[in-house]
Image (cartoon, grey):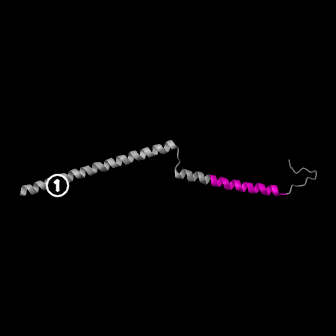
Amino acid sequence: MKDQGSGRARVMDDLAGMAGGAFSVLTGIRAEIEAIAKAQAEAIIRRLDLVRREELDAAMDVARRAREQAEDLAARVAALEARPAPKSGGKSSSNT
């Protein structure tokens, strides 16, 4: 009976070793599949000519600043246009 008990233990140890090896293989396969999927996704994104969020945020910031500058300049032009035109009394105002 001792032989049967040690034989079973040996079989169980072998099965546990095989299961551990299979688990390691499956973990490796999973990592490979994830890497391949990531590479494919990046390739698709490059083909679609999509931009990253950081690039979009930077472009939006530049556009916001340009809009603010345009609004400021429009207000300055409106203020200059609202001034009364200087009266010309025949004298030239240039100092050249």
Give the magenta range. 63-83
Q: Is residue 53 on the magenta stretch?
A: no
In the image, residue 39 lies at what x, y percent? 42, 44
Residue occupying the point 19% across, 52% down = 15
Residue occupying the point 12% across, 55% down = 8
Q: Give whichever of 36, 54 is nearer the camera.
A: 36
Horizontal side of residue 31 vs 55, given as left or right: left
**SS category of the residue bearing label 1:** helix
Q: Residues within 10 Å of mark 1 (few under 14, many from 20)?
A: few
Does residue 46 sit above or below 1 in this rendering? above
Horizontal side of residue 57 vs 21, given as left or right: right
In the image, residue 11 lies at what x, y percent? 15, 52
Residue occupying the point 51% across, 43% down = 48
Picture quadrant of residue 69: bottom right
Picture quadrant of residue 5: bottom left
Q: Residue furthest left?
A: 1
In the image, residue 45 lies at what x, y percent? 49, 45
Q: Main secondary structure of the magenta part?
A: helix
Horizontal side of residue 93 vs 36, given as left or right: right
Residue occupying the point 77% across, 54% down = 77
- Count numbered badges in the picture: 1
Picture quadrant of residue 2: bottom left
The amino acid at mark 1 is Met
Q: Residue furthest top?
A: 47
Residue under numbered circle 1:
12
Horizontal side of residue 68 vs 6, given as left or right: right
In the image, residue 43 lies at what x, y percent? 46, 43
Quadrant (top left, top right, bottom left, bottom right) of the N terminus: bottom left
